Image (tube, rainbow, N blue to C red):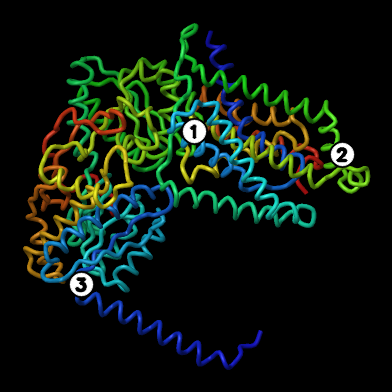
């Protein structure tokens, strides 16, 4: 049953990236706002979860707290910096969020110290099946990723809210003329994106490094998933995660991790080279 | 944009004031014994740098309580190397040129240490590096001679590998004859050189090496590696992958039950910062180091007490290991200066330093004059509730001659 092991490991690796990137998809994939603080939002979520868990809070509460804290942090960021500049310039939000990302990581370093924190696996169990060991928590992450992807697709493609969002990103001016409150709509999307980033930080903390410097790794992988998978499509995010995460995992099974990373990046580059221009950022 | 001429006298006055204040700093240093500490405060070694500073500060306070060094009050100057060798070199020039350091301690990464060595050596200022790793005390350009100005306080791989592996086989693997070892490391100099030496020792001891692999330190998915280790039938895993990479690996390894199949240990992998970041996944990990805050000797008890008083808010799991190192280094250096009778003569300091023999928090420490590396006790430790419990004292260990020097 070695094939089952490959498949499950592939799905776990893909799910990890999808969970990390989903918040960025809403903001960057749909609205084309480059949020360079996304990785630090994920990191902040991890820290909130670690602090909550250290008080004895159940893991679900830790995830919720992380989502709420980072959601509100993103609201503040939107109100102070993004909202005004979003339409006038694509460079300003990029620079502003980059600065905010630095503030967050250095603030964490000042308050929490340079050493990272840990979040205990809330399940802490593994099982053996057909000669391979699997982590219960990692399988739960796969389930969460599937639910997340389905929910996002339904929201964007099967609801009125999603219709208004798609209208706004297609033509903001026309949407406003049709009575859509585009400012409120974007803020809501940014808030939800922040919540998803925070929750991702909490969910991924039992597998990842949570220290003041690790925000950038979340940013890099999330941006690559969103760009590679196609900017407007939930299905694109899923395929991006499958190629970047699952593909790297699968190649790494048969070769070294270094070769797997190089091969994956090469595949990504080739896909982007042959992709249509309309999917790329202006 | 034209310069307003009214600003010229103001700017001139400011420049004069700044110059005078710089002279004042230099003048102060004539009446003080300046300890220059090159500590990384940001970057991958930031935790290490913070701990180094705490230990050095405790030592400075104690030395001043004792009347200073040769009549001079001790002043600690700390400059941030940012975990970067280029910055470390620049800071070394500053700490010697501007701050007039009598002695330099530090740094973080091996690359930082190698960048600082030529600068302190040229200036004739003693430099004691604290990080464990390959020997760096040979003379610049001549690996058969020892430097006149560089000492190493940390241990080298040649000091721990053999006693560590012997102890592992007898105490942990119940004297097993068929030890199958898998080596895993980060893909850079320290893990590769350490594992290379460890592999040669392991093979001489009759261990069967069933795998060896190096991964980029930015790796976030260790599942393929874990599956390979599991399928190799190894009963001993030696991981040389310090820092956050260690935390990621251990989390994923334990989730996939690897700890049930192999005894997990490593060099530098379970260092202070990594254990703190790992949390409970470090439970049961085996480690060789020169210090535990649980060591029972008067010097350690006094040091731990001072540390708790000075930094009550710092829990510093698994204990102030790095701080104890920098504290001990400064205490042994200060003792050497006192025996030399002067604070400004490198040759007299060197003569005294190379006969140093002190009881420090980690136990007895002697400076080996052949290579200017601290001979010291090594201990087999097990991580229990994020503290280093001592399983065995591996005895005083020495580095052999100038073997493996990395100074070009």
When the figure is inspected, residue A4 is found, relative to residue B160, above or below; the finding is above
Taking the spot 34% from the left edge, 52% from the top edge, the residue there is B49
Give the distance between the C-alpha atoms of the residues marked 3 and 1, in whole angstroms: 47 Å
Q: Residues within 10 Å of mark 3 (few under 14, many from 20)?
A: many
- Give residue A170's quadrant in the image: top right
The residue beneath circle 3 is: B32
Q: Position of residue B220 (x, y in %)?
A: 50, 33
Give the mark, 1 or 2, whose residue is nearer the N terminus: 2
Taking the spot 48% from the left edge, 46% from the top edge, the residue there is A213
Judged from the image, the secondary structure of the residue bearing numbered disc 1 is loop
When the figure is inspected, residue B227 is found, relative to residue B393, above or below; the finding is above
Give the distance between the C-alpha atoms of the residues marked 1 and 2, in whole angstroms: 37 Å
Q: Residues within 10 Å of mark 1 (few under 14, many from 20)?
A: many
Label ID, residue A167: 2
* Dot 3 and dot 1 residues touching (CB under 8 Å): no
Give the number of callouts: 3
Label ID, residue B343: none
The residue beneath circle 1 is: A208
Taking B273 as reference, is A39 left or right? right
When the figure is inspected, residue B101 is found, relative to residue A222, above or below; the finding is below
Judged from the image, the secondary structure of the residue bearing numbered disc 2 is helix
């Amino acid at each position: 049953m070695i094939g089952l092991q490959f498949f499950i490991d592939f799905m776990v690796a893909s799910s990890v990236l999808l969970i990390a990137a989903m918040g960025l998809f809403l903001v960057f994939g749909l609205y084309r706002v480059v949020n360079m603080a996304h990785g630090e939002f994920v990191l902040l979520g991890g820290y909130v979860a670690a602090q909550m868990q250290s008080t004895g809070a159940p893991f679900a509460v830790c995830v919720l707290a992380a989502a709420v804290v980072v959601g509100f942090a993103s609201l503040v960021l939107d109100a102070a910096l993004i909202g005004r500049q979003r339409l006038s310039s694509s460079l300003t939000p990029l620079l502003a969020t980059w600065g905010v990302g630095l503030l967050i990581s250095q603030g964490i370093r000042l308050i929490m110290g340079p050493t990272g924190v840990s979040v205990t696996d809330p399940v802490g169990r593994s099982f053996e099946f057909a000669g391979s060991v699997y982590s219960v928590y990692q399988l739960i992450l796969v389930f969460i990723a599937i639910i997340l992807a389905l929910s996002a697709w339904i929201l964007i493609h099967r609801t009125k809210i999603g219709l208004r969002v798609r209208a706004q990103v297609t033509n903001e001016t026309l949407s406003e003329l049709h009575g859509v409150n585009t400012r409120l709509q974007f803020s809501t999307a940014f808030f939800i994106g922040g919540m998803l980033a925070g929750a991702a930080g909490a969910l991924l903390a039992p597998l990842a490094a949570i220290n003041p410097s690790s925000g950038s790794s979340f940013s890099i992988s999330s941006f690559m998933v969103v760009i590679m998978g196609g900017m407007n499509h939930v299905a694109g995010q899923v395929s991006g995660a499958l190629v970047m995460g699952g593909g790297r995992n699968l190649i790494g099974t048969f070769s070294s991790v270094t070769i797997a990373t190089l091969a994956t990046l090469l595949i990504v580059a080739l896909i982007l080279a042959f992709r249509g221009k309309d999917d790329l950022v202006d | 944009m034209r310069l307003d001429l009214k600003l010229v006298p103001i700017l001139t006055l400011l420049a004069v004031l700044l110059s005078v204040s710089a002279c004042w700093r230099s003048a102060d240093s004539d009446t003080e014994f300046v300890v220059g500490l090159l500590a990384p405060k940001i970057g991958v070694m930031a935790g290490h740098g913070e701990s180094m500073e705490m230990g050095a500060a405790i030592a400075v306070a104690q030395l001043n309580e004792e009347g200073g060094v040769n009549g001079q009050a001790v002043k600690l100057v700390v400059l941030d190397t940012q975990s970067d060798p280029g910055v470390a070199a620049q800071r070394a020039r500053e700490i010697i040129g501007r701050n007039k350091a009598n002695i330099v301690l530090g740094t973080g990464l091996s690359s930082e240490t190698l960048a600082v060595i030529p600068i302190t050596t040229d200036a004739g200022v003693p430099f004691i590096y604290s990080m464990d790793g390959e020997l760096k005390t040979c003379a610049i350009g001549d690996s058969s001679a020892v430097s006149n100005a560089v000492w190493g306080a940390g241990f080298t791989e040649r000091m721990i590998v053999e006693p560590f592996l012997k102890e592992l086989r007898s105490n942990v693997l119940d004297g097993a004859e068929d030890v199958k070892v898998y080596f895993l490391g980060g893909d850079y100099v320290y893990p590769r050189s350490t594992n290379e030496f460890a592999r040669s020792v392991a093979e001489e001891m009759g261990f069967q090496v069933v795998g060896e692999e190096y991964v980029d330190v930015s790796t976030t998915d260790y599942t393929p590696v874990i599956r390979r280790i599991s399928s190799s039938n190894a009963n001993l895993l030696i991981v040389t992958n310090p820092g956050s990479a260690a935390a990621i690996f251990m989390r994923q390894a334990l989730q996939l039950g690897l700890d049930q199949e192999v005894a997990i240990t490593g060099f530098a992998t379970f260092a202070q910062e990594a254990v703190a970041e790992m949390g409970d996944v470090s439970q049961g990990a085996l480690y060789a180091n020169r210090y535990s805050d649980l060591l029972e000797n008067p010097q350690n008890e006094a040091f731990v007490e001072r540390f708790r008083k000075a930094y009550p808010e710092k829990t510093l799991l698994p204990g102030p290991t790095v701080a104890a190192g920098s504290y001990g280094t400064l205490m042994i250096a200060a003792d050497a200066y006192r025996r030399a009778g002067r604070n400004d003569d490198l040759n007299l300091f060197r003569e005294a330093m190379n006969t140093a023999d002190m009881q420090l928090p980690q136990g007895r420490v002697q400076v080996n004059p052949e290579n200017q590396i601290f001979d010291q006790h090594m201990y087999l430790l097990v991580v229990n509730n994020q503290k280093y419990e001592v399983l065995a004292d591996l005895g005083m260990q020495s580095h052999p001659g100038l073997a493996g020097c990395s100074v070009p």
